[in-house]
Image: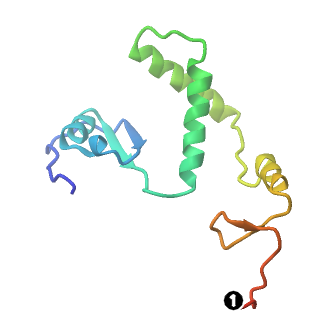
Amino acid sequence: MAECFTLPAELPPLRTLLVWDNLAGHKSAEIVVWLCQHGVMPLYTPLGGSWLNMAESIQRILKRRTLDGQHPQSPTEIGTWFQQTAEAWNRHPTPFLWNGKRRQRRRKQRGGAHALGGSGAHTRQPLSPHARSP
């Protein structure tokens, strides 16, 4: 059950939005109040949704581009590097395609299998929508 709390009447101007998952610790009164007191508004991801895969992909790419082979000396340095990496990527963004080459390769590997409903199950032959069980 969610913990009820009240934010302070006086808060600084909003500096940034923080999108993160629904872990219980992320929703505690202590952390939410601290974030708001520092100009950060937490936004929580839905519990399900295909866009989460894309968001996690973006996070993974940014982290790799920012930190691989690097040895930051402070949190400020990490923040600055992430900011620079995101700005560079925004100038030349990487397109994401849900039906791209990877999906086509997976479909070919199934050997012509036919999807059953959207469950992830497949059959070797298509099922007639009018077929009845014996």
Q: Is residue 17 above or below residue 62?
A: below
Q: Residue at x 85, y 54 (%)?
A: 108
In the image shown, does 128 or 104 lie closer to the viewer?
128
Residue 111, quarter of picture: bottom right
Residue 21 appears at what percent x and percent y?
40, 45
Q: Which residue is mark 1?
A: 133
Q: Residue at x 70, y 38 (%)?
A: 94
In the image shown, does 105 or 92 lie closer to the viewer?
105
The kind of residue tagged 1 is Ser
Residue 49 appears at what percent x and percent y?
52, 58
Q: How many marks?
A: 1
Q: Is residue 62 left or right of residue 17?
A: right
In the image shown, does 111 or 73 lie closer to the viewer?
111
Local crowd size for mark 1, using a 10 Å CA cut-off: few (<14), some (14–19), many (≥20): few
Q: Residue at x 67, y 65 (%)?
A: 121
Residue 98 appears at what percent x and percent y?
71, 53
- As drawn, the residue found furthest toward the front would be 134
